Amino acid sequence: MHRKKRTRLTHEEKFIISGSSHIGFGGQTKLLHKVFSSLPALKSRNCRRYFAGQLISIIGSWMQIAALGWLTLQLTNSAFMVGLVAALFPLPALFFSLFGGIIVDRFSKKQLLLITNSLSMLLAFALGILTVLGVVNITEVIVISLLGGIVSSVSMPAHFAYLSELVDKENISSAMSINAGISSLGRVLGPGIAGLYIAFAGTGGAFILNGLSYVAVIVALLLIDTPYKVTNQHLAPLTAIKEGIAYSFMNPMIRSIFLYVSAMSIFGWSYTTIIPVLARDVFHSNSTGMGYLFSSIGIGAIVATLLVSALSGKFSKLSIVIFGNSLFSLSLFLFSFTSNLNLGIFYLFLAGGGLVAINVILGTMVQLMADEKYRGRVSSIYYLLYAGLLFLGNLEIGYLTDVFGSGTALRINTLAVLTISLAIYFTKDNLRSAQQIYLKS
């Protein structure tokens, strides 16, 4: 009998060289065997509880996103104001997310998630009650959006860092894929439910339902038993921020990912902001049509999540990013010319798949490459670039839509995204070489 020699690799090398781990579970049905083999993070009971709560909460959050755009359009009749209100939620990330990363590295991530989810629940209830009573105005919508963004500046870095505590290091990629799948499923169900609910019962109830959805994740967190982990307690805030930034930008791959995420936040994700405007003015539909458009993005995202999980071992990560970027650009470009709702739904299905394929790869790479003691701060920088710069993207597309029309606004952003894809393609070999040198140093 001989033992198979195991070669130990760093988690960075393991991710770049290979795909996901596969773990079998004897005695289970074939379906469960396939699920747990392809998504081994689900072996953890804590992980299953957390993601169950997250799914319900994310459905509620996407209900609120769709309802908030519709409410703003009703109150102001302005595409720019729809973009502005959408931009106000990620705006605080520019100012608070780096400090949020310090908080995440200094305190229990589980306790932070309990606090931030409770605060988000109260804000959703406040917006819902004001809307149901018929006394809501755009000022109150703006204030609540800003407060929600401040809370999110702590909760999002805590969420991504907490995933690394729920599973073993080798299953982080699996946990990130599940997280992306759940986010995509919430994107499918939430706007669709919101559209139908608004059509039959009004906008305010959608906000209240979102408030109730936070109960699920709070209960899940209370049931989870994870060790109290604090990785950094003593550094001064500015020193800790400087250290986290320096660490992130020393790694060529993380640095490139951050630059890419910055550009995509401005020119890529912002198209979802004007969907309420497109539903009403281009497709001549109501809130139900808006829900269909949002949901088609989510369905595409779910399909993309499954395909990325299956194909990541067969194709390089950069190849998947380039393909996803190209698919998104082409689909959104074609979408900008159509006024047929069914065709629009199909194009957004493809666009949602392309964009989420990119995010699954990039988010997983960042979490796997970040050292544990920096993970909260690295996550906060990622969130700052993703959400904070989304503020600029939302303003940009809202302004362009008001001035030039939605079709032109979408085409301008599409050309910017396609340019990014070409830049990645022509520099990919240099990026791979730089990363290999970094890993060996």
Image: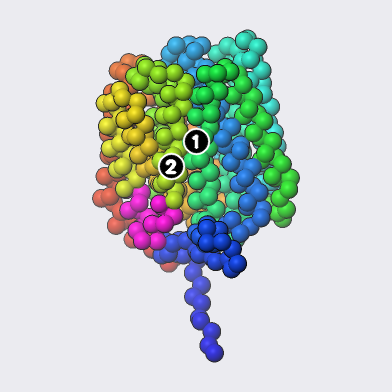
Q: Residue at x 55, y 58 (%)?
A: 32
Lateral position of residue 406 relative to residue 298, left or right: left
The 10 Å Cα crowd at callout 2, few under 14, some 14 to 19, many 20 or more, is many
Q: Main secondary structure of the magenta part?
A: helix
The percent coordinates of residue 99 (x first, y second) are 60, 39
Q: Is residue 55 above or below residue 70?
A: below
Q: Nearer the viewer, residue 310 or 175?
A: 310
The mark total stands at 2
The percent coordinates of residue 83 (x first, y second) are 44, 22
The percent coordinates of residue 391 (x first, y second) are 46, 28
1 and 2 marks in contact (CB < 8 Å): yes
Q: Nearer the viewer, residue 128 or 286?
A: 286
Residue 421 visible at all: yes
Residue labelled with disc 2: 301
Q: Label 2 amino acid?
A: Ala
Between disc 1 and disc 2, whose residue precedes? 1
The label number, if any, that marks residue 223 in the structure image:
none
Q: Quadrant of residue 114?
A: top right
Q: Is residue 51 above or below residue 10?
A: above
Q: Residue at x 63, y 9 (%)?
A: 135
Residue labelled with disc 1: 187
Q: Label 1 amino acid?
A: Arg
Q: Residue at x 41, y 29 (%)?
A: 293
Magenta region: 307-322
